[in-house]
Image: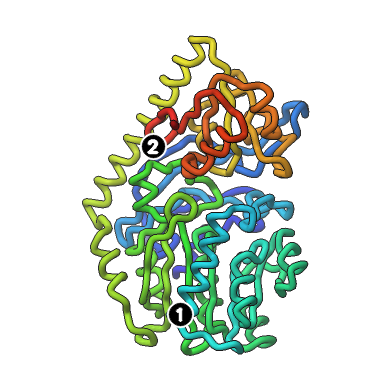
Amino acid sequence: MLAERVARAAGTGGSVPVEYCQACGHAPLRKVLSLGYMPPVNQMVPIGAPARQQPWFPTELLYCPQCELVQLGLAVDPVIIFPPEYPYTSGTTKLLRDNFADLYREASATLKLSPQDLVLDIGSNDGTLLANFKNGGHRVLGIEPTDVGRLAAAKGIPTLARYFGPAAASEVKRAHGGARVVTAANCFAHMEDVHAVLAGILDLLAPDGVFISESHYLVGLMDRLQYDTIYHEHLRYYSLTSLAKLLEMHGLEVFHARPIPTHGGSIRVYAARRGAQPVHETVAKMLASEPHGEEMERRLAAFAREVMLSKLRLLALVRELKEGGARICGISAPSRASTLVNYVGLDEGIVEYVCEIAGSLKIGKCMPGTSIPVVEEDRLFADQPDCAIIFSWHIAGELAPKLRAKGYRGKLISPLPVPCEVT
Ligand SMILES: [Zn+2]
């Protein structure tokens, strides 16, 4: 029944509306918010290329009143959103490197891992997470469908170039035996058939095995107005409540959960077969702190209103600057910048260019859905435009002093949660 209700876009070359809850199969889902039509965040055309037609997809957020999962209203074919040349690497961000080192320390202390234990990472990217377990003397294996996996293999981390599902799971189990730990960091909200993924994880986990996931956190997303993290890669926006219900459907019990700082606010959640691990008090505490039912619906409605107001506030600030003759550029082009730029309606007439650090694969291309060029950061210091909007505003506190030290003298603006000057 559930399997029939999963919105499967893989292989369609296009998209499929999500008509039933991705977790519990409930219908109808309630609409929370619409950001309009958006280009895929990786759709970046070379600077100066003639304008051609491009796909844009509706971007709506839906709420399931039965299991409380907040989810995207559309599944887009993974071929479109995760092209083989997918440019994202986790090793380049210090916050992520530190977080994975912390995950290793916490997991090895909590689970008392021994050297022969197998640790498997789903969506292992460039191997940054697994490198910690490998250095700790454990057996490791990564699963990564994009070309980024080759970076991990070059570092000596065995990596299977596959999408994860029941077939990949049984292949791994035959070759390596059961896994003591399966991790999924910043990808468990991305995969479209989450029940097939969980079936694979369950098959692969040793009887005392533990599944550790890290996902962007819905409550933090609402609190800090991070609507810019809503894009087609992110199919689901978990609270601990909705995630625990989803895991329960597969016999997995959450036994530890805590907030972590990555991606502007995420949760790390430990689960094992029911009764296999003592349940820490962190679980009940976090569940009790979350809004439920009608309160959640009120919070979601307030969030939608604030998103709309934040667009108008940013436009008002930008209008004032432009009427004063200011030149405006952008700082950094993370995926989330695409949602902000396209929802607010910033274009090359408003933002002259966006800067990325030398070596970024985005340099030489345009921001998705616009003709705003992405250029090397040097230009900012030579050019000294009047203001710069920090698109990776969630790390503005870390970026601003660096930009000052390198010599930028103009105004630095954080576009969210409330547009303001960063001092
Ligand atoms: Zn549901």
Mark number displayed over residue 109: 1
- For badge 1, the amino acid type reads Ala
Question: Could one spot residue 248 in this view of the protein?
Answer: yes
Which residue is located at x 37 percent, y 65 percent? 258
Q: Position of residue 47 (x, y in %)?
A: 74, 30
* Residue situated in front as seen by the camera: 85 or 2: 85
User: Quadrant where the N terminus lies?
Assistant: bottom left
Q: Residue 410 occupies which quadrant of the picture?
A: top right
What is the count of numbered marks?
2
Q: Residue at x 22, y 51 (%)?
A: 295
Q: Is mark 1 within 8 Å of ligand 1?
A: no
- Residue 254 drawn above or below residue 78: below
Residue 15 higher or lower than 6, as above or below? above
Instruction: Give 413 or 77, whichever is nearer the viewer.
Output: 413
Q: Which residue is mark 2?
A: 417
Mark drawn on residue 393 = none
The crowd level at tag 1 (other Cα within 10 Å; few <14, some 14-19, many 20+) is few
Q: Quadrant of residue 41?
A: top right
Depth check: 216 or 243 in front? 216
**Residue sticking out furthest to the top:** 324
Question: In screen coordinates, is 20 left or right of 50?
Answer: left
Where is residue 65 shown, x and y percent of the image? Answer: 30, 56
Disc 2 is placed on an element classified as loop
Front residue of 95/46: it is 95
Q: CA distance from mark 1 to mark 2?
A: 37 Å
Residue 37 versus residue 89 in the image, above or below: above
Q: Residues within 10 Å of mark 2 (few under 14, many from 20)?
A: some
Residue at the spot 31% in from the left edge and 45% down from the top edge = 300
Q: Earlier in the sequence, mark 1 or mark 2?
A: 1
Image height check: is 88 above or below 25?
above
